[in-house]
Image: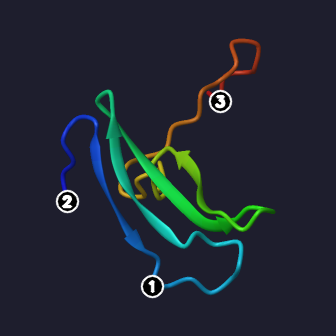
Amino acid sequence: METRNNSGAIFKNENKKAENQPDYKGKVNVNGKDMEVALWLKTSAKGVKFFSASFSEPFVKNEPQINNNEPQYKVLDVNEDLPF
């Protein structure tokens, strides 16, 4: 889902398994930058319900940087003996 500038969508976290996980989460765009938002429904000492919020950079799965099909090269130190 693409978000427009300064907008977003937040949904109930149906996969919540632990108390520290957010009650709601979603994606927003703030000033042209995509962000993830997490919300926890809390109750103040006076009994007033409110949301606690956290914003973070979108999660990016780390992909291996080395392609095994490409030859690997060793950079020789100029002070090393040449192999020939």
Asked if residue 59 shows in the view, the reply is no
Percent x, y for residue 62?
50, 55
Mark 1 neighbour density, 10 Å: few (under 14) some (14–19) many (20 or more): few
The residue depicted at 51 percent of the width and 37 percent of the height is 73
Which residue, given by chain and number where applicable, does mark 1 sit on?
Answer: 14
Percent x, y for residue 9?
30, 58
Say which of 82 and 26 sits in front.
Answer: 26
Left or right: residue 44 versus residue 27 is right
Q: Secondary structure at mark 2?
A: loop
Percent x, y for residue 75?
59, 27
Q: CA distance from mark 3 to mark 1?
A: 61 Å
Say which of 49 and 75 sits in front.
Answer: 49
Residue lying at the far top in this picture: please name it.
78
In this view, 4 is above or below 67: above
Residue 46 in which image quadrant: bottom right
Q: CA distance from mark 2 to mark 1?
A: 18 Å
Choose the circle earlier in sequence order: 3 or 2: 2
Which residue, given by chain and number where applicable, does mark 2 sit on?
Answer: 1
Q: CA distance from mark 3 to mark 2?
A: 56 Å
In this view, 7 is above or below 59: above
The amino acid type found where label 1 is placed reads: Glu
The amino acid type found where label 2 is placed reads: Met
Please identify the quadrant where the N terminus is shown. Answer: bottom left
Residue 17 in which image quadrant: bottom right
The residue depicted at 37 percent of the width and 49 percent of the height is 70
Residue 83 is labelled as: 3
Left or right: residue 18 versus residue 45 is left
Q: Secondary structure at mark 3?
A: loop
